[in-house]
Amino acid sequence: MDLSYSAEYEAFRTEVKAFIAGHWPLRGDEAKLPGDKRAALFRERAIAAGFLARSIPRCYGGSEQPADVLRAQIIREEFFRARAPGEMAGIGPSMLVPTLLEKGSEWQKEKFIAPTIRGDVIWCQGYSEPGSGSDLASLQTRAELRGDEWVINGQKIWTSGAHRADYMFCLCRTEPEAQKHAGISYLLLSMKQPGIEVRPLRQMTGAADFNEVFFTDARTPRDWIVGKRGEGWIVSRTTLKHERNMIGDAQNALATFEGLVQLARRTTRNGRPAIQDPAIRQRLVQLEGTVRAHQYSGYRQLTKAAKGQDPGRVQLMNKLVSTNIGQEVAKLALDLLGDDALLEPGDRQLGGPRDNAQWVGQFMWSLGSAVAGGTANIQRNVIGERGLGLPRDAAVQRS
Amino acid sequence: MNFDLSEEQELLQETVRQFAANECPPTRVRAIFDGDEGHDAALWKGLVELGLGAVAVPDEFGGAGLELLDQALVAEVLGAAALPGPFLGHSLAGLAILWGGSDAQKKTWLPKLASGELLGTVAFAEGDARWQPEDWALAGGATLSGVKTAVPFGVQADLLVVGTAGGGLALVEPGARGLARQAQPGVDRTRRIAELRFDATPAQPLPHGVGASARVRDAGLVLLAADAFGGAQKLLELSVEYAKTRQQFGVTIGSFQGLKHQLANLAVEIEPARGLYWYAAHAFDRVPDESARSAALAKAHLTQVYMQAARDSVEAHGGIGFTWECDVQIYFKRAMFDRAFLGTPSIHRERAAALAGW
């Protein structure tokens, strides 16, 4: 057991640091560009240097580096430390791109991957429907092949970012006669067309990050299908796996916990810092136990992955652990806020410490993780069935 | 970056696992559990012959020359097997002499502990949750006077390491004048406890005891955390097995979400938490600044997880889980021991908060 990195990796870390020092923040006239342009410029240079888009071939705009989870970890650490833009965030780079790499056709990879990882095009995901949430494979939105086009009718819901998206990747029923899972195809389509109507859904936080999307004879070319007809369910599984990794991040949990400790330092109880209150101290350390466990579990999974070994069923637990931590942080934060828990939620915090209103927002947002990308109860089914080998529910088995 | 066990460490665990499976199957655990004395000399001898009497004691004193992490890995496996015996107290007695003793004391006592010629233990608790070196009030010096409670195998031990006022340590031999030893009715029958009364009892102070005692306590916290992790994992396994076998309403009960989710929640509490005791042991061996706090955090967290796992496992087993006949009760009581021995989770959480400067 040795938590340090070998000389080879420390040399790599020096290289990463030197790159960041030379390129971020931008200098001269470039420093005056708007934020997203500065980030895009930096990312372009980081890709050229081999630090971002590492798993993506050069011909699709990536840096095509040999897989090395430790180097990837070092890059994340150093970019995070320097507040330099890391991999382009969002559903396109994190979910669509890995899917295309694995299942897409050549022209699809050439057309879509490079602009997606640069952030030039924005994607949204059309999975859930009003009647199909956890039981996603019961979805009803239909796509019919007419001549050289798919014609799509139906409705999607909880579509994050649909109002900003250029394209959607979605699951549609294309083989109405086939058995449930086998009737689904994975289609790509443009959001900028008359057959699509996007209506925002206002969340409990007051903001509207997701939407309903209505399809009325929306169209997409015949070859904008990923995988074959009826294989959409299998194609979509590739992406869900990636999403799980994306959300279950121990580093975020640790950062959130450290934010909570700061909150306990700057709020008061009976005229003294809350962090001196014995009950608060107990709750903080109790929570820290779970956070540290998650962190060390991450180290172990990283080590296993670096050795090419399977980390085992603990991987299935990452998302639920993160969700649980978020909920516990939220409850303790609300107690620390005192009267400020009467405030309306502030805007979602992105980097930097939260103010009190943003902690009220976190209290609500922490529930998002228990619902989005597979509810906590579905996660428990997955852990119970795939992890512990318990039998499936008889009713689910029949459907 | 390598947060995993070495091949040697995996082999060590496998060796102990095999030993426990062959020499101490559940039937033998139960026989010892139900027996009067609770100490099986033949079983203990077998463990000592594997080199487990002094895992982290250097080989010049007859030990295995390994580190606390290795000792904790052994504790995990023994915890999973609910293996009855004096491993904990004996290990801590050896470490106390190693870190607190004079050269002569080390040469005299450590080889005898390592070979199993003598059975060692530690006497720390003074009642009212006073376990920590700074809590000790027993008057020390050339003679000892006062009372120690919850001494593991205190009746059977041949050598006692006693905590004294000011955080010191002293050795007492069983025949010493003024020493009265009385078995206590302990809940965990795999680890019997005793009350020791000292009345001007001759003792040999360990010259470096004041510096060593907190470190011995920290090692104990790590070993308890490891035992708790092993026991909790085993409880999960027993409960999952039961859920896969037991039939009701014509199906296996593990297919019901009520039980499935309870077991999934349990798995999520237990499995990722292995690293807490690994890291605490690693910090103890290699990262001195984080050693005390990591040990406190690991002990508080894992023993609480173990206790909850035991409660949930009784529930998962239904009526049979509440019986003396079911092995779950043995783990349940080991969880109670791990939780309270050396101080409850809340004591160590407060210590962890203070150690963080909060």
Image (cartoon, rainbow, N blue to C red):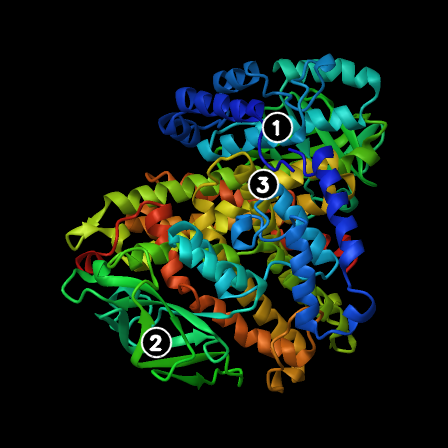
x and y percentages locating residue B159 in the rendered image: 68, 22
Q: At numbered mark 1, what does the secondary structure look like: helix, strand or loop?
A: helix
Measured from the top left, where is residue B71 in percent x and y? 61, 28
Q: Residue A66, image x and y in percent?
A: 57, 40
Check the residue under mark 1 and report the chain it is in.
B
Which chain is home to disc 2? A
| Above or below for B285 versus B58 | below
Q: What's the amino acid at mark 1? A: Asp
To which residue does mark 3 refer? A68
> In 3D space, how far apart are the residues under numbered discs 3 and 2 (Cα atoms)?
38 Å
Q: Position of residue A10 (x, y in %)?
A: 74, 39
Q: For the residues tagged 3 and 2, is the chain the same? A: yes
Residue at which label 2 appears = A156
Whole-angstrom CA distance, mark 1 to mark 2, is 55 Å
Q: So how many labels did they put on this image?
A: 3
Q: Quadrant of residue B224?
A: top right
Secondary structure of residue under mark 3: loop
Q: Quadrant of residue A358?
A: bottom right
Q: Amino acid at mark 2?
A: Lys
| Residue pictured at 37% horizontal, 29% vertical | B26
Asked if residue A146 lies left or right of residue A105, the reply is: left
Residue to which mark 1 is pinned: B70
In the image, residue A223 above or below residue A8: below
Q: Nearer the viewer, mark 3 or mark 1?
A: 3
Q: Is residue B279 left or right of residue A132?
A: right
Q: Can residue B274 be seen at all in this image of the molecule?
A: no
